Structures are given as structure tokens and as C-alpha cells.
Amino acid sequence: MVRFCISKRPAGSIPGRIILSGLCWLLAGAGTVASSVVLAKPQAEQSRSQAEQLKPDPEVMLIEVYKELSANRLRQAQAKADALVEAYPNFRLGHLVRGDLLLMHTRPVTALGAVAGAPEDKLKSLRDEAMVRLRWLRERPSPDLLPRPILQMRDDQKHVLLVDAKRSRLYVYENRGGRPKYVTDYYISQGKFGVNKLKEGDQKTPVGVYYITGRLSAARLPDFYGSGALPINYPNEWDRLNGRSGSGIWLHGTPSDSFSRPPLSSDGCVVLTNPDLHKLSASVEIGKTPVVIAESVEFVSQAKWEGYRNTAARLVEDWRRDVESLNPNRLFANYSRQFKSDQGEDINEWWAKHQKFPVNAKKLSLKLRDMTYFFYPDRDDLIVSTFTQDAFDGKSRSTVRKRQYWAKEGAHWKIVYELNL
């Protein structure tokens, strides 16, 4: 439970002036970060309409309320809380904090949400949301670090969305020559029972690399989904291969009577506030925008990230050369003995059906383009590579989009699953 601590009150000060003790450790050292948030948000959201640009960011406003409290400035905190609920009247956490501030003028408050007779489960949800939003200040990654899962995007992929379930954040990265460049991030809610979805109805959010498959407007949906929805392709081929089931995983908004939802509250979808979903939709391209969902995202130095990307690129390039060699043994060495096809075939059965070289071919030219590389979320031993393959054997030409899953087995990387898209 988040608790309050009562500060020593100087003569003439407001009675019951307090600091949020359970949040003090988050606020300590967060001042410079909070200041950068105020600057970063407008820069990241230039696509908003002029009216939206002028509207204050609710998360920044909430942070400012806590900062005033940590400095024992109750009247200033009250004024900022009033402004917050006026700008966002359905922001329940904002109302909860404002209610506590009103009580502080008359008596000490011993817990966040000092509402007599309020349902404890509702209060816990709001307390969880408060802690998650503030923890983001301390755990926000340095701009000098790069997300480990995103190693390469193809040229026509303008953005990638990265969900960090542990932090309840969705990060938006722009494609800068194949390298991810941070744009902005949003608070999100996830499945009631966390991540690693296995089956229909388990109320968990899947972990994996997905793509936006459509855009559903609010007019086509019940109010529950808010300002719209962005479906993703769960289950993907890796999910199906591993026996995971279910459907209907979306990025969507909140009902009109709620500004946001608690961190663990969906049936498996990723839920944003309606304003944030509206802004996010502007950066999404159907069929192109990847959505990488992880339980916890690791951010690494640029040097380490370059090493990971070079490893992924080298695996595919060595495979390409082995195909061009027309040597079946060289090519076969790229594949794992644990290989399984989507039809349940082992490596020998699959190889006999699919890996046939052109008859009487003396030379084969294989060009690869439009590559994407991802470390599979929460895995350091699985890389998914997707590329377009142009093959020419002197007589005929063929083009296919291919995806490979490379697993690390001891000191070597091997293909454990491959399919044509």
C-alpha cells in the first residue's frame, strides 16, 4: 500500500501538509527527468492538431502535482490537481489525488485514496496505476541506449511499436536508416494475468513479434473500445507452432467514462487512453508496422546493439552464400536437428519436400532485400529474420518473401523454423 508521511509543520503552514512517502523514492532524483518529459512530449507529437498540441499532457500534470507535494507545497499541488481534473474530467486517478489533497487541508492522510467506504479493489487499481506512472520516471531508458529486440527494419517501415509490459509502457521508434530512433511513449494496460498468452480466455497478453493488420473506427465498435482499435496478427506462425491459441488481440482505447485503465485490467489486449490511441494511429501502417510485445525490454549500448545486428545479418548472409554454392551439405548445416515445420514435419521430411536445387543449374544468383531482424522478445537465443529473396539460375527468375527463426544451440545458430510468406 502507498502510504503518506507527515512532514514537520513550520509555524503558520497549512495543517496536515504531507508528502507521499511511498512515492518519495520515485520522486527523489526524478526532477530532471520530469522536466525533460515536459520538453519531450510536444517534440514527439508534432502530428497532433493545433488544439491537441495546446492541451496539457495529463501524465506531466500528474507528475507536477507529486513534485509540489514532495516540496511541501500543498496549495500549489491543489491548484495543479484542480487543473488536471478540469482538463481531463474522466481521469479517475486525478480525481483520487485531488480528493486526498482536499482532505489534507483538514487532517492527516495515511494512504493514497483516503476515501471512506470506497471499494478496496478499485483503490488498489488506482494505487497501482499511480506507482507505475511514477516508476516510469526512474526507469525511463537513456536516449543513448537502444532497444535490444529491434535490430533492423526495412526501408518502407516508418515506425515500430515496442510494448514493455513490466513498465506498462508502449514505446514508438522511428526508422532512421534501419536503426530505431526514439519518438515517444505511452502508458498502457495489459492482460489481467500479465503476459505470455497460451490459450483463449486466459486473460494474458501475448509476447512476440506481430504486425498491425487493420484499423477499426469507433463507429464500428462498442463504447468499451473507446476511440478505435488496431488488431494484430496473434497468433503468429511461431505461436501456432508452439501450440498457442486465441484471437482478437488489439491495441484499443478506453470507454468514454474512463480516461485510463489500471495496469492489469484487459482480457489480453494492449489498452491506451483514447487521446494516445488517436496519436498512435497516425504512425501506424496496415501490414507494415511491427508490434513487439515483451515482458521486459532490455536497453543496451549502441556498440552492443551493433554487435547483435551484425550477428543477425551474418547468419542470413552465410545462409545466402550456402544456397548459391549449390552444395546441399553446406546448406543443410544451417538447419537444426530440432527443426519443425508447421505441418509437423521434422528436418529430413521437410528438406526432402522443400529444398530442391534447380535441375542442371550450374550457377545460382541469390539477392536478398528488405530485411528485418528482431531478437524474439525476452529471448537471447532466438532471432527472427524476414527478407525478400530474388533467385536467378540463368534460365528463370523467382521472388519470394521468407521468414526464418534462428535459435542458438551451444556456440552455433541454427534455423529451427522457416516459411515462405
Image (cartoon, grey):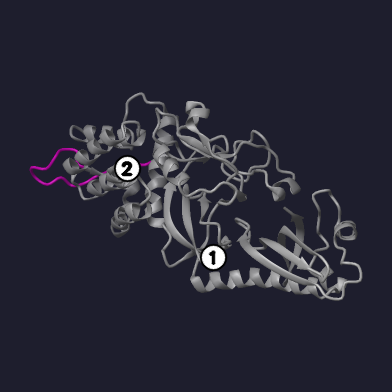
Residue farthest toward the left in the current orientation of the protein: 12
283 horizontally vs 407: left or right: left
As drawn, the label of residue 52 is 2
At mark 1, the secondary structure is loop
Using the image, determine if residue 419 lies above or below residue 120: below
> What residue lies at 71% left-to-right and 69% top-to-bottom?
367
Relative image position of residue 20 (x, y in whole percent): 29, 45
Using the image, determine if residue 390 lies above or below residue 270: below
Which span of residues is magenta-colored? 2-17
Q: Does the magenta stretch include residue 223?
A: no
Using the image, determine if residue 52 lies above or below residue 95: below
- Most prominent secondary structure in the magenta stretch? loop
Q: Does the magenta stretch include residue 5?
A: yes
Quadrant in which the N terminus appears: top left
> What residue lies at 73% left-to-right and 45% top-to-bottom?
240
Q: Characterize the local packing of mark 1: few (<14), some (14-19) or many (20 or more) Cα atoms within 10 angstroms.
A: some
Amino acid identity at mark 1: Gly
Q: Can residue 121 be seen in this view?
A: yes
Quadrant assignment, res 311: bottom right
384 horizontally vs 23: left or right: right
Residue tagged 1: 178
Amino acid identity at mark 2: Glu
